[in-house]
Amino acid sequence: MARGLLGRLAYGSRYDRVPWGQRVYVRPGERLIREAQWRLLLRQRPVLPLAAYQRLRPLGEIEEFLSCMMCGESRQQPLFTPAGGAPGSRGWRYHVVRCPSCGFLYRNPNVRPERLGDLYATGYSTFLTGKYAANRQRRYDLTMKSFAPVFDEGKERQLLDFGSGVGLFLELAERRGFDAYGVDLSPESVEQANQRLSKARTYFGAPGDVPEIAAGGFDVITLWSVLAHLPRPLEDFRLFRRLLAPGGVLLILTVNARSLLLKAYGAGWSGFTKNHLMFYSSETVRTLLGRSGFAGVAFAPHYGDTIEAGTTKLPPGLVTRLRRNVEQSDGGNMMRVLAFADEEAIGRWGGGPLTVHRLHA
Ligand SMILES: [Zn+2]
């Protein structure tokens, strides 16, 4: 309420028709204000030893306390308590802390890996249909375009979609000529995916448990909105690195913990969804990739699906301003990452508009 009022005082009604997710990128000066607000928040919030932090928080039956998985720091800086849920339902709530050493944001307490299934009630797969499915596939197409030419033609290259759900991405991948495989932990989703797909195949289980997947040799691995759900990201990424063939690449789409929208809306940020466990930025994802043996990484800015698809109703002047602010600040509300397994991969795919950052273990 107070925030809306301040916005009204500062900007009048000029930006009322701009969707919420775009306002922070188009209102003059707002980017600098939000970044200053964020720095102030980080200065004000206390940093606690893990033991002191644990005394503040009750521990749920399926939960555990963590130290920072990226750098090992155990001290905690409590930042946000996102909450949600449909009216009348029991709802959800969790605590997000920041690592005072490397800036990693994560849920703490977190969910014990063996109890992850408790987060995903049955029926999880059924809402991934209709308009939602079309929007998803548009998002996949736009992201593949931003990493051209990696995804332009499959040419029988082997692709693994990790967390393949009902197969919406695999459908696009097989159409482009990839020899495509998927794995997912929801048996219902795997069954639906295999009905949808003609040549691509999905399997139920963890990659290491499925012989067809564990054999490795993949040219491409994709993680569409999966990274934030992983309770043991380093173990998973070391496995992904082993499953990649020489010259292979890994694509990640995830919520961006450097987003201006997070700085503006805090606990109300769209990235704090019920089942997200960890929140990466371009800095912390570099740590994850370096520690799991990748040689390089490149980022493609995310301007928003309607802007990139050309269906936005924003006037051209505001589109230009939005693009500039995304490039000069956070890279967008979603983070698009292409990781290169080795020097061969950098040589093959690292050209064009992509800037490759070399990683060191
Ligand atoms: Zn850390």
Image: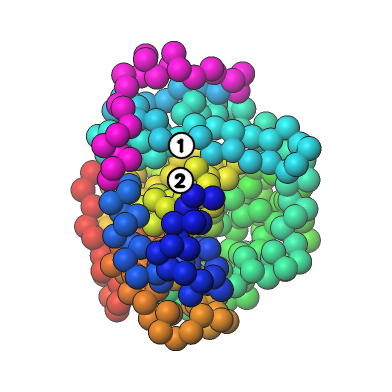
Q: Residue furthest front?
A: 9
**Quadrant of the rendered image containing residue 77:** top left
Which of the image's four quarters has the C terminus? Answer: top left
Percent from the top left, x then y, of residue 89?
76, 36
**Quadrant of the rendered image containing residue 246:** bottom left
Along the horizontal axis of the image, is 173 left or right of 322? right
Q: Earlier in the sequence, mark 2 or mark 1?
A: 1
Instruction: Look at the numbered disc 1 and give the secondary structure of its residue.
Output: strand
Percent from the top left, x then y, of residue 125?
73, 51
Query: Which amino acid, mark 2?
Result: Gly
Q: Residue at x 49, y 19 (%)?
A: 57
Query: Which amino acid, mark 1?
Result: Phe
Using a 10 Å C-alpha cutoff, classify the residue at mark 2 as few (fewer than 14 neighbours), some (14 to 19) or many (20 or more). Answer: some
Q: Is residue 15 visible?
A: no
Q: In this rendering, is residue 62 above or below 100?
A: above
Q: Is residue 50 visible?
A: yes
Percent from the top left, x then y, of residue 171?
65, 68
- Give the spatial CA distance, label 2 vs label 1: 7 Å
**Number of numbered discs:** 2
Question: What segment is highlighted magenta in the picture?
Answer: 39-62
Q: In this rendering, is residue 129 above or below 150?
A: above
Label 2 with label 1: CB-CB less than 8 Å: yes
Q: Is residue 45 magenta?
A: yes
Q: In this rendering, is residue 55 above or below 9?
A: above
Point out which mark residue 80 bears.
Answer: 1
- Per the image, the residue denoted by label 2 is 266
Q: Is residue 74 magenta?
A: no
Point out which mark residue 65 bears.
Answer: none
Residues 303 and 347: in front is 303
Using a 10 Å C-alpha cutoff, classify the residue at mark 1 as few (fewer than 14 neighbours), some (14 to 19) or many (20 or more). Answer: some
Percent from the top left, x then y, of residue 112?
54, 26
Q: How is the image coloured?
A: rainbow
